[in-house]
Every structure is written in structure tokens, then in C-alpha cells.
Image (tube, rainbow, N blue to C red):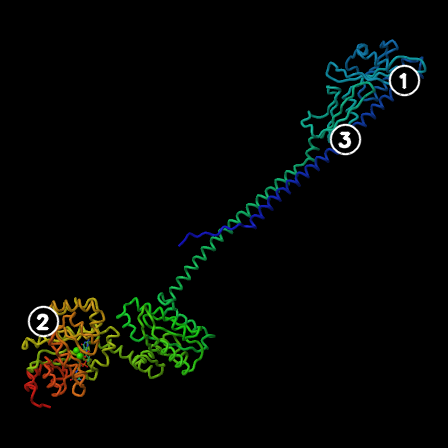
Amino acid sequence: MGVLTAKRTFDKSYFIAWVIAILLFLAVTLVAYQIRQTQINTLNQILKGQSDRTRSQIIYNAQELTSDLASMVNRWLVNEGTQEINWRSDARNFIERTPGVNEIWWIDQNLKVRWSETLLPLHHVDIQNIISQPGMTEKLALARQDNLPEFSHVVNTDDGYNIIFILMPIVYDNDFDGFFAIEIYIDDFIERILDDPLNTGFYTKAYAGEKVVYTNGPELTKDSYLEYFELNLDADTDGWVFKVYPTENLAATILSPLPYVVFAGGFLIVVMLLLTLLSRHKAKQKSLQLGVEIKHREKIQQKLSYLANHDALTHLPNRHFITEYIEKYLADSEKAATPFSLLFIDLDHFKDVNDTLGHAMGDRLLMKLPELFAQIFRKQDIIARMGGDEFIVLLPGKMAEESIITLVGRFMKQLKYPVDIEGHQIRLTGSVGVAMYPRDGTTVNELLSNADAALYRAKDKGRNTYAIYDSVIEHKAQARLKLVNQLHEAQEQQRFEMFYQPRYDCQGNMVGAEALMRWLQQDGDYQKPKTFIELLEDTGLIVSVSWQLFSQSLQNFKILMNNHKNIILSFNVSAKLLEHPEFLNRLQYIVDEQQFPYDRLELELTEQTLIQDVENSQFILNQLTAWGINVAIDDFGTGYSSLSYLKNFPVHALKIDKSFIRDMNEDEDDLELVKTMIIMGQNLNITTVAEGVETQAQLRKLMAMGCDQYQGFLFSHPISFTELQANINQLSNSPLMNLDGSDGLN
Ligand code: C2E
Ligand code: CA
Ligand code: CA
């Protein structure tokens, strides 16, 4: 048997699943990317707003500051004369209300610092020095010319603060009183303008050139979320740059890991989907494989059940099938309502085909039968081979006896057409037994055994015919069954006995006697073998009965041999006994056990028995002859008159069948035959024995033809051993023989 493989075809759904998974993965990635983009956009938008707000706040506050300074200049001009006291209080007020301002100076038109006012001198700044630094003179001149405030560059204090100065010109009409200078702490100033980053969500960082002048956040880690704007404090200063960026909290809130979660989740789903598909695919493959395996097993199962239910030779349903079929049919109450008929068919003399042409030819002939059956029987009819040359045909449905008879007739006619087997034209005949359901039985056993009984009856009528089961047959079958039981019983109770019929030579001397079986009945009568010998053979009982009687007759003969040393015991050997593998051993064992002389024993075998298995017969006969046991051919002339085998078998005597002796007087042919047999015996140096000699006339003719020995009612019927023993002296010399064949002793 080949290796099992499930065909791996291209799995379309599997491919589609992969595509879907990949598309799903792409979709998830896209969605995650979109979310991220939206997050960034949102953040950037908020950032832009914050940046604008910061810018306007700073500008607004710077303008406030300068306009406040302008008001201070106005007050200076109005209050001219009481300048110092008024100015100082004004200056202090200014410092107090302006965050980040620490000190205010008045610098006169010659750029000399005249007054200064501070609330809490944190540190000293040398303003004189500052205004004299390069570029400052120009700034001051510009301020005076434009009448606008000017801003100094950023200055670092000793303790690390960043400060700037605003220089405000004091100008009215054509008069010029110098400048007010105010010192501003950038940190303080901006910090008060801007809200707490915790509230806004943004940090701010200010650069003046390279220099960081303000920061309320940690060092920037990323440039990506950053908004900046430039701010010029006045027309000629370098611009400051303000950078606005989100606090960690805000960034974390807006830039939540949602897209990553979406991506990871999607990815996981895709992976799981794929895994599921994969395992399902595998399971499918497996189940496919399993399916193939199951199919394979089913096939074997089917084959086995086919073998169990069919005959290997003809492929017809077998005995097992048909009996089971009928059983099921009868068990099914619905079906069981419909009648059917059974034909039990047995081919006549099929054995002869096997014997003459060989088993192979016999098989070939059997193989042709289904074809032949098919020509006669209908499709719905079931034809089964019961074994050997026996067949059953089940005809479903109600059929009249006449229709069955017609059908059987057609079948038997069909059988007779010669069948060609390798050039041999073989003609068959058959016997058929018919039983009908429910008339002739309601169980398988009943129906089959009744069909068989009918068949038996058909054969009994002389074969090539049919019989329909009826009560007569039933009666016969039952009687047969009863007889079988009785035979068993008789064997157990040793009710079989031997009678003896003497045999004479032509001088009238008793040369021996043939042992003939009798069955002792309850009433003391003896029954002859005609009624039961066939059944003994059919049941195989013949074997044990024969050995028992053989032993018995040896014992009887030993007693006779005390006075009649030379008499020979003739014993009939059935085919069943001869073909038994233990035949020779058993024979030898019993003869030796009785210490019986081998040469005083003769075994009678019919022609039929001898040719059943020629090789075996030859072997056995050779052994018997080697031991000195005589072999006689019984019923000679009735069997296969092919006399050639006589040369092959070592034979001592021919017992010419009594039918020839009986008819000899009327039938010239029979007389001729007997003559021929006697001459043949003489030629082959074989003793000829005439059986069933009843009359003087027969005896005379036989003696005239030179027959060697005689047996028959004329001399003695078969008699019991007791009788034989009592009369042995009278019997041992027959007075009938002293005729010299001439005297008319009728
Ligand atoms: P068989 O071997 O041919 O035996 C001779 C039969 O002819 C005997 O019948 C005998 O009674 C009968 N017979 C003898 N003389 C005459 C006569 O003058 N006229 C007529 N009409 N018949 C005569 P039996 O005893 O009834 O036996 C019948 C057959 O049964 C035997 O035929 C033999 O084939 C078989 N048989 C008998 N005893 C045994 C046995 O122990 N073993 C076996 N295997 N077969 C036996
Ligand atoms: Ca005999
Ligand atoms: Ca005989």
C-alpha cells in the first residue's frame, strides 16, 4: 500500500487571508501615523498661539514701560524748579509699581549722572561706566534726536543677573535736560509678564544674540516642538529671540502614546489573526490527511467486508452473506411481510470434472457460472455460492409454484449448453431444491435446510431435476435426521455387529468369509446396511464403526482359525476409511494387536473408492501387498470399466458384481461380460470371485467359464458369528460343489 498523502493544492482562502492580514497591517500603521500627525499638528497649533500670546504680552508690557517713562518725563517738565524732591518721589513710585526695575538715574545733558534713586540697593551698577561704553554715546545721541527711548545691550551683574537699561531723553521744545536711565532685571520683568508654565503648558526662553537672557524651563531636548519669534526692543538694537516650547506634561498629554498603542494593538491582532489562520490551515491540512486516512481505512474495511461476504473465485455473494441477508430480511418486520423463494442448486457430477480435467479447469468452469446465472435470473435475484458446486438463488417477491418451475426449467436448459473451457466442451446438469418463505419456514436455518432437503430429494430422483419442498420431503428429512441420531446411539452402544458369508473354491472348499455389517435393533432383528450405510459414510461415522468391527471380526476369525487355519477374512473398506490419513497405521496397529496373520486378511475395495485418489490408493495398495494383505476389487464391472488401472494396482481378486451374475441367464451381453472378466482375471493371474450366486444354473455356467470362487445365497446367507461357529464343519465343505459342473442340481 502506498504512502498516504493529502494533495496539497493551492489554497485560495489561505492566500486571501494573508492578503487581508497584510492590508490590515498597513491600515493599522496608517491610522497610527494619522493619529500621530494630528497630535503633532494640534501641538504645533497650540504652540503657535502661545507664541503669539507671549509676543504680544511682552510688546504690550514694554510699551507700558516706555509710556510710563514718557509720563515721568512730562511730570519732570511740569515740576521744573522743585525738581529734586519731586523727582525722587516720582522715581520711587515708578520703581515700586514697575516690576524688575531696581534703580533710576537722572543723567544731565553733559551725560553726567546727577541723581539716583533706589529702594533697595541690591548691588551697585556704575551707570557712568555703562553710558561711556562704545556705542552708547551714539545711542544717546539718537535718543535725543528722535525723542524716543533707547535700550542698552545686556549687562551681567556680579551675581549673575542679566540686566538692561532704558535711556529716556528729556526733551521739550528746544530744551534738552539729559536722560532718565532705568535699570531692568530681565528675569523679573519677563517673569511677571508671563504666566506660570504649569498653567500655560509652555516654557519660554529668550536669547539676546548668543546669550540666554531668560528661561523658565529646562534645557531644550528636542527642536521639533518649538516656536520662536524675534523681538526688537527698539529700532537699532539687535533683535531678541524668544523660543516657546511645551512642558513635559503638555507634551505627554497631547502627544499621548495612543498611536503606538493603536499600532501595537493592530499589529497584535494581525499576528493573532495570522496565527489563528495558520493553525486553522494546519488543522485543515491535518483533517484532510485524516480524511484520506479514514477513506483508506474505509477502503480496507470495504475490501474486508467484500472478502467476508463474497466468494473469491466467482465473486458471487457467499454463504455468510446470504444467510445474514435472509436473517436481516426476516428480522425486519416490514420486509418480512413480503414472501420470497430459495433455490438450492447443486451441479451434478461436478466432481468428475475436477477429477478428469483437474481442479484448475473446475475453477474456470465455476467462474463462468455467474454469467450463465445472469442470463436466466433477474437483477433483483440474489445468487450466492454456498461452497463447492452449491449455489443459492433468492427470488424476491411472491411467485407461483408454476412460475418457479418454469424458471428452474429454463435454468436447467441453459446449463446444458456446452461451455467451452480451453477447447473442452463441457455440459453441465444440476439439481435444484426449492423452498418458499414463509410457507416452508420462517428462519434461515429452516428455509436453507428445507431447500437442501428438497435438493436432496431431487438428487434422489436421479439428478438433473428439481424438487419443491413439501411435507413428504420434510418427513424424509426428519426421518434422516432421526436416523443419524440413532446411528450415533448405536455406535455408542456397540449395536453394530458382523455377519459372515462364506466363500468357496470350485472344489466346494470354504476358502474364507466376507464380513458384512449388521445393526442390531431393539427388537432383536438385524438391519442390513442398505438403509444406513450411506448415512454412516455421509456423517463420517463409518470410520469409528469400521475399526470397531474390524477388531471384532479379527477376534472372531482367530477363534475359527484354531480349527480352520487357512480361511481368509474379507473386510469391506469404505472410501472414507481409505482416505483417512491414519488408515495404514491404524490397520497395522489393530492387526498386530490381535496378532492376526497378514496373509489371512483380504480387503475389499470398490473401483469407485480406488479411483477417488489414485496416487493415494496406489501407495496404500503397495503397502498392503508388501505386508502380505490381499486386495480384492468389489462390485467389479459396475464402475469405470477402464480396466487398464488393474495393471497399476496390485490386486489379488476380482469380485464380479452380483448384477451380472443375476442377469447372466437372460442377458447374453452380461454373460459375455462375465466371460470376459473371468478371462481377464486368468490372464492377469487374478482370482475371480462370483458374487450373489443364487442358483445351480448360475453356478454351473460360472464353473464352466472357469470362475475361481463363489459366494451367494446358494451356499449360505450371511450369518452371525455364533451361527457360523456352530455350523463351520458343515459349511467348510459345500456338498453343492460335488457336481463336476454336469449334474442338474436345481
Ligand atoms: P457387498 O460388499 O457387495 O456385499 C455383498 C452383498 O450381497 C451383501 O449385502 C450380501 O448380503 C449380498 N448377497 C450375498 N449373496 C447374495 C445373493 O446370492 N443374492 C443377493 N441378492 N445378494 C447377496 P449386505 O450385507 O446387505 O451389504 C450390502 C453392502 O453394504 C455391501 O455390498 C457393502 O458394500 C456394504 N457393507 C456391508 N458391510 C460393510 C462393512 O463392514 N463395511 C463397509 N464399508 N461396507 C459394508
Ligand atoms: Ca463386498
Ligand atoms: Ca460386492
Task: Answer with mark 3 or mark 1, whichever residue precedes in sequence.
Answer: 3
What residue is shown with label 3? 50
Pick out the residue farthest to the front.
423
Q: Which mark is residue 73?
A: 1
CA separation in Å, label 3 and label 2: 145 Å
Q: Is residue 281 above or below residue 612?
A: above
Residue 635 % position (x, y): 18, 78
Q: Is residue 103 above or below residue 201?
A: above
Residue type at mark 3: give it.
Gln
Name the element at disc 3.
helix
Q: Residue at x 57, y 46 (%)?
A: 18
Residue type at mark 1: give it.
Val
Name the element at disc 2.
helix
Quadrant location, the C terminus? bottom left
42 or 673: which is nearer to us?
673
Marks 3 and 1 in Cβ contact (< 8 Å): no
185 or 509: which is nearer to us?
509
Q: Is mark 3 within 8 Å of ligand 1?
A: no
Give the class, few, some or many, for how many residues have Cα within 10 Å of label 1's Cα (few <14, many ≥20). Answer: many
Left or right of 685? Residue 458 is right
Q: How many marks?
A: 3
Q: Is residue 524 visible?
A: no
Q: Residue at x 73, y 19 (%)?
A: 211
What residue is shown with label 2? 599
31 or 580: which is nearer to us?
580
Marks 3 and 2 in Cβ contact (< 8 Å): no
Residue 427 % position (x, y): 32, 75
Q: Is residue 472 visible?
A: yes
Name the element at disc 1.
helix
